[in-house]
């Protein structure tokens, strides 16, 4: 099964998620591709908030942009390769699917380390990873752009949590502009600000000060 063994091998280092997930396959033409590694996961992350560590529930989800792309101008989408994104038509991308096996570990590393994320357009964040594209011998080193959205949610009847959604993830490509990078921020700082529903770009409040949104100057 294309990409299946690669995903299993790469995800072997991951800690078990809180809930179990069933294998998920998508059919592309006459082939089946495993996207189990892109199932939503739940985590509890220690986040330093005003001098004390808070156990912050974090949920991670992925969109189909992680394994599909927009057809190029004049490109004919092969039968069975169509991927629906609302009203928009996308097409399955084998390279994106292949590289998506890196995503779970990239996200775990973000939550466990002191990584910084670039502020990107539209309120999103950008992580650029140097990864091996193993389609062929020897593997090729490429830049892998991962676009994230992070927000605090408090649904009715559910616990407050931070949702990290991978909006898209794609390799460097001469046909795609490089993502616009603004200032970078530590993931720990972003999580603390999101948890308190304040702007991560504002100065961090001192320990013991009242909670709430930081006022803009």
Image (cartoon, rainbow, N blue to C red):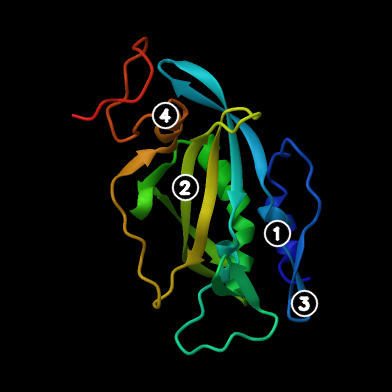
Left or right, 60 with reference to 180: right
Label 2: element kind: strand
Q: CA distance from mark 3 to mark 2?
A: 31 Å
- Dot 4 or dot 2: first in sequence order is 2
**Placement of the C terminus among the 4 image quadrants:** top left
Q: Crowdedness of circle 3 by 10 Å Cα count: few (<14), some, many (20+)? A: few
Q: Which mark is residue 7?
A: 1
- Dot 1 or dot 2: first in sequence order is 1
- Dot 1 or dot 4: first in sequence order is 1
Q: CA distance from mark 4 to mark 2?
A: 14 Å
- Dot 4 or dot 3: first in sequence order is 3
The residue where tag 4 is placed is: 197
Q: In the rendered structure, are the residues bearing label 4 and label 3 in contact, judged by CB atoms less than 8 Å apart? A: no
Q: Nearer the viewer, mark 4 or mark 2?
A: 4
The structure residue drawn at horizontal position 36% and vertical position 66%, both measured from the top left corner, is: 178
Q: CA distance from mark 1 to mark 3?
A: 17 Å
Q: Crowdedness of circle 4 by 10 Å Cα count: few (<14), some, many (20+)? A: some
Q: Which mark is residue 83?
A: none
Label 3: element kind: strand
């Amino acid at each position: 099964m294309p990409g299946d063994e690669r995903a299993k091998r790469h995800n072997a280092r991951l800690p078990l998620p809180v809930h179990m997930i069933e294998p998920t396959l998508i059919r592309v033409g006459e082939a089946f591709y495993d996207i189990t590694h892109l199932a939503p996961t739940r985590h509890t992350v220690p986040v330093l908030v005003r001098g004390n560590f808070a156990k912050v529930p974090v949920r991670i989800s992925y969109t189909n942009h992680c394994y599909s792309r927009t057809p190029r101008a004049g490109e004919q989408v092969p039968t069975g390769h169509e991927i629906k994104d609302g009203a928009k038509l996308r097409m399955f991308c084998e390279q994106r699917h292949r590289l998506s096996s890196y995503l779970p570990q990239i996200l775990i590393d973000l939550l466990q380390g002191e990584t910084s994320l670039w502020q990107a357009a539209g309120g999103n964040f950008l992580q650029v990873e140097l990864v091996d594209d193993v389609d062929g011998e020897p593997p090729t080193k490429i830049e892998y752009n991962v676009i994230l959205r992070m927000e605090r949610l408090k649904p009715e009847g559910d616990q407050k949590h931070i949702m990290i959604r991978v909006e898209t993830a794609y390799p460097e490509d001469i046909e795609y502009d490089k993502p616009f990078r603004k200032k970078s921020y530590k993931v720990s700082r972003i999580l603390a600000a999101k948890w308190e529903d304040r702007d991560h770009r504002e100065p961090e409040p001192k320990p013991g000060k009242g909670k709430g949104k930081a006022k803009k100057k």
